[in-house]
Amino acid sequence: MFNQGDLVHVPENVTVYSYIAERRVVWPTDVSKKPHLAIFLEYCDRKYASVMTEDGRKWIVEKEDLFFQEVQDAC
């Protein structure tokens, strides 16, 4: 279970979705071409979650495709 602000890993070849609020529809729009670090934003429903990638894009992905990203000690 993720909390807002958690650092997460999005692997490559993960389907990225768009959310159309007026129709409450999630639609596949792209596939991640490489692994990404992201900040967990929120759960959209039982299956999907939104994240902000390291380059500032907001993605919706299936929550089963997210993994905790361990932070390495800077020392």
Image (cartoon, rainbow, N blue to C red):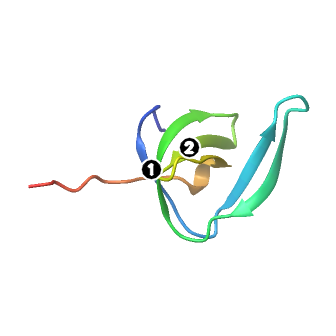
Quadrant of residue 15 in the image?
A: bottom right
Dot 1, crowdedness within 10 Å: few (<14), some or many (≥20)?
A: many
Q: Could you tell me if the residues under marks 1 and 2 are in contact, i.e. CB atoms within 8 Å?
A: yes
Q: Which residue is mark 1?
A: 8
Say which of 1 and 41 sits in front: 41
Which residue is most to the front? 55
Residue 21 is situated, as x and y percent measured from the top left of the image, at 82, 30
Q: At x 61% / y 34%, what residue is drawn? A: 43
Say which of 32 and 65 sits in front: 32
Q: At x 50% / y 40%, what residue is drawn? A: 40
- What's under tag 2, amino acid-wise? Val
Separation (CA) of disc 1 from disc 2: 8 Å
Say which of 41 and 3 sits in front: 41
Q: Where residue 20 is drawn, which disc sits there?
A: none
Q: Is residue 22 above or below residue 48?
A: above
Dot 2, crowdedness within 10 Å: few (<14), some or many (≥20)?
A: many
Q: Which residue is mark 2?
A: 51
| Lower sequence index among marks 1 and 2 | 1
Q: At x 68% / y 43%, what residue is drawn? A: 48
- What's under tag 1, amino acid-wise? Val
Which residue is most to the left? 75
Residue 16 is situated, as x and y percent measured from the top left of the image, at 69, 56
Say which of 41 and 56 sits in front: 56
- Secondary structure beneath dot 1 equals strand
Residue 66 is situated, as x and y percent measured from the top left of the image, at 53, 53
The answer to whether residue 73 is left or right of residue 43 is: left
Q: At x 59% / y 48%, what residue is drawn? A: 57
Residue 3 is situated, as x and y percent measured from the top left of the image, at 45, 32
Which residue is most to the top? 22
Quadrant of residue 6 in the image?
A: top left
The answer to whether residue 24 is left or right of residue 60 is: right
Quadrant location, the C terminus: bottom left
